[in-house]
Image (cartoon, helix red, strand yellow):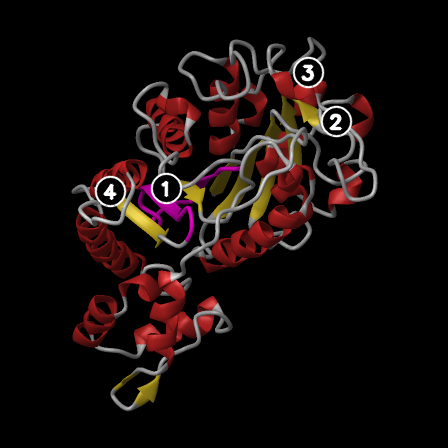
């Protein structure tokens, strides 16, 4: 079963602007589209379906696949439908190339001290991401950067968790040394470790999915659904490329829950069985029925989370609608006791992490509701 953990923050108190993006992947795609293998055109990465891409790679020899990954790592590493181990190898190569480029850039005479510091930070992060044993499913250094990492084995997983972050998520914030559970990579690892502790012999994986462009700060972009819409397209493509033998649960944090809300009805219904939102500013739907999904919808919010103070309204495209933990919304409201603030839902020992683990493993009868009447689990197992 696939579990998507979607994480973000949201607000709309100030204007914000994204930095102009350099686009190394666009250059790589252009080169790819002018390339060929054994006299055959290469599939368009922006329009070919995952099934088409999968059939294409299946028709190649191992040597041909490796040559494509070596020549076009920024394309192959992000290509839904390409063999997953090949994507890991391509992204390791792309990360190494970008690390070398940033080290070189850090010595540029026309760079400011802050610019040199940022270049060295990026070089360090790229080096960390390409460390032995890490499984990078997607990597794009364009702009602030996008990345996705897998914990576990996607090929054998029956349940897979994917962490998808929200505002202010980029290459540099993907992982943290202090309070690692507050960053996408640490959240995914915490969930995976919790699953392994609860079910050592189970077949599951977790993906830290920071593979969409998020709002920059708590400004205008975070108060609209524009970036969530674009992210939902990417999420849908990634989900559909996962093995048919796995099913999907989405765990959506803050602005990530906006992405889940706008994308819920487009995702493959037989694959996505659960959508769990926490610290949510709203899902751009009036209620669960408005999400147009057959998935179970869960909602959680810790009492100390500042997100409860945002205006749960939508006016002229600003705001994200009703509060998902309100009774009228119709979600299954679960306990997040101990989470502490907006980014603590995956901290060790919290009821939120325990509940997410239970949902990820399909142990619906063990989920602890926010109230004593256990209405949140009514009929959940029967619907599984």
Tell me the tag on residue 374.
3
Q: Name the secondary structure under disc 1.
A: loop
Label 2 SS: loop
Residue at 30% x, 79% y is 59
- The mark total stands at 4
* Structural crowding at the residue carrying mark 2, measured as other residues with C-alpha within 10 Å and reported as few (<14), some (14–19) or many (≥20): many
260 or 248, which lies in front? 260
Query: Looking at the image, is mark 4 or mark 2 earlier in the sequence?
Result: 4
The one of 166 and 151 positioned closer to us in this rendering: 166
Image quarter where the C terminus lies is top right
Q: Is residue 301 left or right of residue 326?
A: left
Please give the residue where the numbered disc 2 appears in the rendered image: 323
Of tags 2 and 3, which is closer to the observer? 2
Earlier sequence position, callout 1 versus callout 4: 4
- CA–CA distance between discs 2 and 1? 30 Å
Earlier-in-chain disc, 4 versus 3:
4
Numbered mark located on residue 171 in the image: 1
Mark closer to the observer (1, 4): 1
The reply to whether discs 3 and 1 touch (Cβ–Cβ < 8 Å) is no
Q: Which residues, given as a range, are shown in magenta?
A: 143-166
Q: Which mark is residue 134?
A: 4
Q: Is residue 275 visible?
A: no
Indicate which label's residue lies in the foreground, 4 or 3. Answer: 4
């Amino acid at each position: 079963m696939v579990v998507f953990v979607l994480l973000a923050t949201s607000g709309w108190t100030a204007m914000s602007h994204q930095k102009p993006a350099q686009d190394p992947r666009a250059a790589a795609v252009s080169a790819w589209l002018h390339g060929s293998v054994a006299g055959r055109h290469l599939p368009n990465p922006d329009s070919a379906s995952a099934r088409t891409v999968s059939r294409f790679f299946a028709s190649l020899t191992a040597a041909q696949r490796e040559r494509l990954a070596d020549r076009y790592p920024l394309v192959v590493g992000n290509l839904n439908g390409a063999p997953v181990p090949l994507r890991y190898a391509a992204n390791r190569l792309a990360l190494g190339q970008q690390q070398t480029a940033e080290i070189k850039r850090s010595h540029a005479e026309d760079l400011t001290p802050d610019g040199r510091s940022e270049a060295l930070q990026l070089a360090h992060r790229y080096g960390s991401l390409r460390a032995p044993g890490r499984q990078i499913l997607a990597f794009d250094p364009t702009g602030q950067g996008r990345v996705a990492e897998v914990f576990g084995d996607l090929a054998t997983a029956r349940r897979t968790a994917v962490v998808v972050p929200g505002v202010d998520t980029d290459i540099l914030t993907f992982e943290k040394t202090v309070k690692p559970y507050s960053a996408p990579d640490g959240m995914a690892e915490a969930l995976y470790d919790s699953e392994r502790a609860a079910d050592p012999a189970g077949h599951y994986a977790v993906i830290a999915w920071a593979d969409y462009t998020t709002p920059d700060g708590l400004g205008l972009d975070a108060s609209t659904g524009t970036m969530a819409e674009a992210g939902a397209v990417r999420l849908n493509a990634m989900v559909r490329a996962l093995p048919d033998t796995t099913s999907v649960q989405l765990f959506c944090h803050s602005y990530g829950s906006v992405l889940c809300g706008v994308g819920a009805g487009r995702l493959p219904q037989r694959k996505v069985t659960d959508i769990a939102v926490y610290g949510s500013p709203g899902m751009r739907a009036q209620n669960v029925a408005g999400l147009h999904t057959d998935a179970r919808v869960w909602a959680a919010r810790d009492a100390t989370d500042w997100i409860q103070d945002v205006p749960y309204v939508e006016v002229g495209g600003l705001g994200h609608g009703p509060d998902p933990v309100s009774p009228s919304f119709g979600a299954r409201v679960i306990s997040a006791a101990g989470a502490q603030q907006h980014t603590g839902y995956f901290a060790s020992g919290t009821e939120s992490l325990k509940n997410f683990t239970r949902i990820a493993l399909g142990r619906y009868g063990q989920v602890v509701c926010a109230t004593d009447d256990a209405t949140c689990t009514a009929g959940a197992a029967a619907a599984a």
